[in-house]
Amino acid sequence: MSEQTFSDYKLSEEIIRALAGLGFEKPTEVQHKVVPIALEKRDLTVKSRTGSGKTAAFGIPVCEMAEWEENKPQALILTPTRELAVQVNEDITNIGRFKRIKATPLYGKESFSKQTAQLKQKTHVIVGTPGRVMDHIERGTLDLELIRYLVIDEADEMLSMGFIEQVEKIVQKLPKDRVTLLFSATLPKDVEKLCHKIMRNPVNIEIAAAPGETNTLIDHSVIAVKEGDKPQLLLNLLVVEIPDSCIIFGRTQEQVDRVYQQLDRLGFRSGKIHGGMEQEDRFRVMNEFRKGAFRYLVATDVAARGIDIDNVTHVIHYDLPQDAEGYVHRSGRTGRAGKAGKAISFATPSEDKFLANIEGYLGFEIRRRKMPSKEEVSLRQAAFDKKMSIQPTIKKDKNEQLNKSIMKLYFNGGKNKKLRAVDFVGTLARIEGVTAEDIGIITIQDSVTFIEILNGKGPHVLEIMKTTTVKGKQLKVQEARE
C-alpha cells in the first residue's frame, strides 16, 4: 500500500480535523481501499476481519457525504448487537463532530418513547439493530425517505443470529437509489445471496484472511483437557502466560458465572459479560475493560461480535465454540492493529468434532500444547504475583484528545419555549471570538437544550451566556453532566 494520508481523499477540512483529533494518521488497508470507492457512491462488499479499521472505513464517507442542512436521516447503519450499535454510534459522532453530524442509536431494551423523541430531532445517521429499527419502521417513527447510504456491519453475525430476514425487510423499505456497503469477516453463501439481492454491481474488496490465510499475528494453540480439570488449567495457564489483557470465553451464561466467581474468589481483578445481565451493567463492564480497569474479562460470544478493544493480548476459549466462524470472531479480539496475540483453546474429548471443524475451516492444524507443568508454574509464579500486585494502567480513551476541547452546555429551555437551533446559533455567533465553526451538535428537547461548544471556547461561552438571553428569554446555563 502506498504511503497515503487522509488528505489525499479530498475530504472536508472538518473531517480531516476530526480524524487528526482521534489520532488517525494514515489509513489502514481497508480504509485505503474502501473510502475512495465509497466516496464515488458505488456499492461495496468488504470482507475484512474485525480490528482492521472498518468502522472508520464506512464512517468517513458516510459523514463526508451527509448534509448538515437536511433534518431527516440520510444514512442507516445496521449492526447485530446493542454493544456494537453504541460503539459505532460513538465513532460516527466523533468522525462527524466538526460537521455537526448527529447520529442516533436504536436498539432493544431501551425506552421506545425516548428513542422516538430523539428521532424527532435533526438526525443525520441512524445506527441500530435490525429488530428495533424494524419496530420503528412499523410504528411510523422512523422516516426512511431520504436514506441514501445503507451500511450492513458484521453481516455474517447477522446471519448467525437470525437477522437476515429482518435486514431484507428493512432494505425493501429503503429508497432504491441508495449506496449499499456490506462488511463481513466471512462471506457465507446466504450473505452472498443477500448481496446479489440488494446491491447493484458491487465492487468486491477482500482484506480479511481467507481460510488457510488466517491472521498471522495470532498464535493459535489447543490444550487437551477433561471438563473437571478446566478450572485448575485456567489458573495455571494464567500464571504461566501472565497476560496483560485477556478475554476468557465460555459457551453459556452459567459457565461464565462460574469462571468469574472462581477468579473473583482468588482476588483476580476481573469482570464478566453475558446476555443475562442488565444492559447498563454490560456497557459499564465493557467500558471498564476497554480502559484497562481489570485484566480478565469472562464472556459469552456476545463480547466477540465486533467490539473494538485495543491491546487484548490473549483470548482463551474455555469452551470451544460450536462453529468455526465463532472461533474466528472470538479469536479476532486479539492480534489487532498490527499487534501480536494468542488464542488458546481448551478441548475436551467431546469437543473433538468442533476442533476438527474449526481446523478444516482455517485450513491448518492448530498447534497442540501440553498443560503447564508444576515446574513451569513454579518458575513463573513470582512474576505473576508481582504483576497481580500492580494496578493495571488505565488506558487513554482514543476519543480523549478530540473531546478535551469540547464542552457540552445545558440550557433549561427547549421546544416548550419555542426555541429553535437557529435561535441558539444566532445568539452564540454574536459572542465576540465565537463563530459558527465553534458550535457543534445542538439537541433541542421539550424542556432542555444541549449544545456542544468546540475549539476550547466552552468556558468563555458559558460565562457570557449566564447573562445573555436567547430569543428574549433568560435561560439557566451550566456545563452538562454526562
Image (cartoon, rainbow, N blue to C red):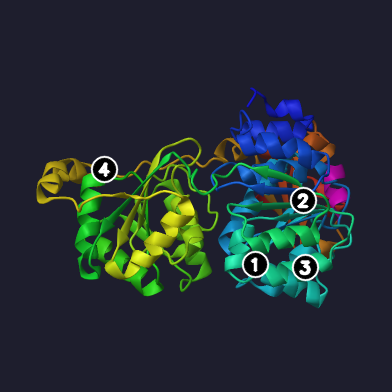
- Proximity of marks 3 and 4: CB atoms separated by less than 8 Å: no
Q: Position of residue 401 (x, y in %)?
A: 57, 35
Q: Callout 1, which amino acid?
A: Tyr
> Where does the image place residue 135, in percent across and percent down from the top left?
73, 75
Which quadrant would the C terminus be assigned to in this image? Answer: bottom right
Which range of residues does the magenta coloring cover? 420-427
Please state which of residues 415 and 45 is positioned toward the viewer in this rendering: 45
Image side of residue 461 versus residue 300, left or right:
right
Question: How far apart, in angstroms, are the residues tagged by discs 2 and 4?
Answer: 43 Å
Q: Is residue 292 shown left or right of residue 37?
A: left
Residue underneath mark 4: 390
Instruction: Identify the residue under disc 3.
Output: 170
What predominant SS class does the magenta segment belong to?
A: helix
> Residue 364's spot in the image, x, y percent?
41, 48
Instruction: Give the residue at mark 2.
Output: 442
Query: Which secondary structure lies at badge 1?
Result: loop
